[in-house]
Amino acid sequence: MKKYLLLFSALFVLAACNSGNNDSKENTADSTIVTTDHSKQSTSSSTKNSSTANTTSVTQTKPQNESSQTNSSHENHALSAMEELQANYPNEIFPDPATISGGKPIGVAVSEESQLLTVTYYVVEKATPLNDPILNGQSPIAQFQRKIFSTKEAAQDEVGQTYDPNGQPVDLGYDITGYQTAGAGSSFLMWQEGNWSLAVQANNLEQESPLPLAKQTVGYLERAFLPIPHEVGQISFRVTPSDYQANQVVWQDNQTVYTIMNADSMSSLKMAVSMTK
């Protein structure tokens, strides 16, 4: 009996040891699994942080590249003064700049107020932007105006058409007859072509004659075409101009009046003709 008790005690001790070993193995396994999971989480977090950093780097770099392209594009497409003028007033027609100053570079200034658009031209040494401050104080060589009136009658009065057929008849060529009058130290030679009235003024004190310029004008208009007035137009020249306002080409287009002024009489004609193209 005593032997059986000793044997039973030994078996109980062995069973307890085996159970402890199994629990230790399970705890070790569980610990290993937890450690592995933490390692995976750490690796995943590191990868995400790296990805976020790369994304941020790309996002910060992209706008810099786009800004550089925009600036480069703007520099490559710089507008001249005339191109900028046309871009600002896309519905307006302006004289061809090549007719203004005989091919010399021109500076341009523009202003607008109370239905009056004024474009003033200057001779410059090199091309300048529109409304460049360097033009301030310089003498204009030409000017273009567009003015809108409330009625056609008001526009027609603005043109101020002048024609006197009671003077001495003068043959201007091309079957055109002008009429010359004199008074107040000046002589005037006037004629009509279509809806246009034309007049050349000469200074009698300087012994000037209006005939050569009148014939030159008639000859030019035989091969060039002015805008068609609706209803009237007036051309006024001086043999010896004092400034850009001395020679004027003015015409009505319903409620709108266009005015061109140039220090050179023939250039003022060419400016007007260029607006028909």
Image (cartoon, grey):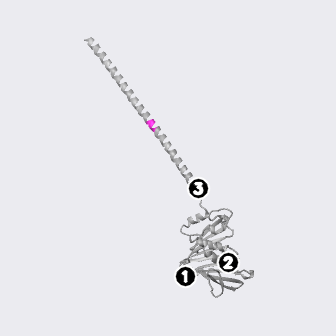
Tell me the magenta residue range: 41-45
Residue 74 rendering spot, x and y as whole percentages:
57, 56
Residue 197 as seen in the image, left or right of residue 51: right
Residue 144: name its quadrant. bottom right
Q: In percent of the image, x 50 and y 42: which residue is there? A: 54
Q: Quadrant of residue 191?
A: bottom right
Give SS at disc 1. Answer: helix
Q: Which residue is mark 2?
A: 213
Amino acid bearing label 2: Leu
- Look at mark 1 in the image and give the residue it sits on: 153
Q: Is residue 56 above or below residue 179?
A: above
Which label was assigned to residue 76? 3
Q: Amino acid at mark 3?
A: Asn
Secondary structure state at the residue bearing disc 2: helix
Would you call the spot at circle 3 few (<14 residues within 10 Å), some (14-19), or many (20 or more)? few
Residue 43 belongs to the span the image colors magenta: yes
Q: Earlier in the sequence, mark 3 or mark 2?
A: 3
